[in-house]
Amino acid sequence: MGAIAPTVTGPALAASACSLTAQGEGRVGAIIDARTFRMDDGREVRLAGIETLTTATRADSSAALRALAAGRSVTLRGETDAPDRYGRQPAFVFVEQAETSVQNQLLAQGDALVSGIIADKACAAELTAAEAAARRARLGIWADPMAIKNAESPGDILARIGQFTVVEGKVLSVRQAGATTYLNFGRRWTRDFAVTISRRMWPAFEAAGIAVKSLENKRIRVRGWIEARPSPRIEALQVGQIEMAGEN
């Protein structure tokens, strides 16, 4: 990834739309990993709304978060204060009363990816705009021309099994099999990349103005965790994981 930008530009300068329910304040005592830290009071906080990557050019993937938050006083906000299964509190983090979240800053620097699973529309749009600005400027992650995987290269995608990845390509067909819809990016189901969408997710897509069947022959960008079943796949559990390529 690229160097940490000294200032945040573009969408990140505006007051954050991620002004959700207050979840407390405190001081960051220790950085655990690229998106997790421990407060002085012992709480472990996980940055909500983003995913981070480890690359060959940055051995210490937590460097960006450390530069922004280590030893600083922070305010936590979120959609819920319920801990995840590891006991970590997911939250949007604001350093010393800043109007811009740490998540937004990491995205604007090219040090993170939008997860696509934030339900609050205004917040999700803000994060997406910050990522898009970094992508256009080829900052951090986006300096690598292979940061977005080509859906026509299933071998490259399979190399990222178990990792959060962004894939872009043209949907060749949309097929229904039982309760699952398949967005197929190739014609060989045992080898080519596909996105799966559960039928129960259809209403959410329709509410967002996306008819799943209408994605056929459209070029889209999808993000999520790569699985092999047996071909590389991403399961779309939230509408925000899929976007029309070229809109940002």
Image (cartoon, rainbow, N blue to C red):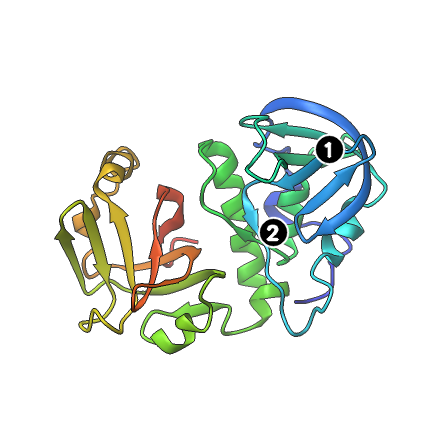
Identify residue for label 2: 107
Task: Report the quarter where the C terminus lies.
Answer: bottom left
Would residue 118 be found to the left or right of residue 180 on screen? Answer: right
Q: Would you call the spot at circle 2 few (<14 residues within 10 Å), some (14-19), or many (20 or more)?
A: many
Task: From the viewer's side, name the closer residue of 116 and 209.
Answer: 116
Q: Would you call the spot at circle 1 few (<14 residues within 10 Å), some (14-19), or many (20 or more)?
A: some
Rendered view: 144 above or below 197: below
Label 1 sits on a secondary structure element that is loop
Query: Where does the image place residue 106, in percent across and percent down from the top left?
Result: 65, 51
Label 2 sits on a secondary structure element that is helix
Identify residue for label 1: 43
Tag in front: 1 or 2: 1
The kind of residue tagged 2 is Leu
Rendered view: 114 above or below 220: above
Q: Is residue 202 visible?
A: yes
Residue at 59% x, 44% y: name it. Answer: 11
- Residue 220: which quarter of the image? bottom left
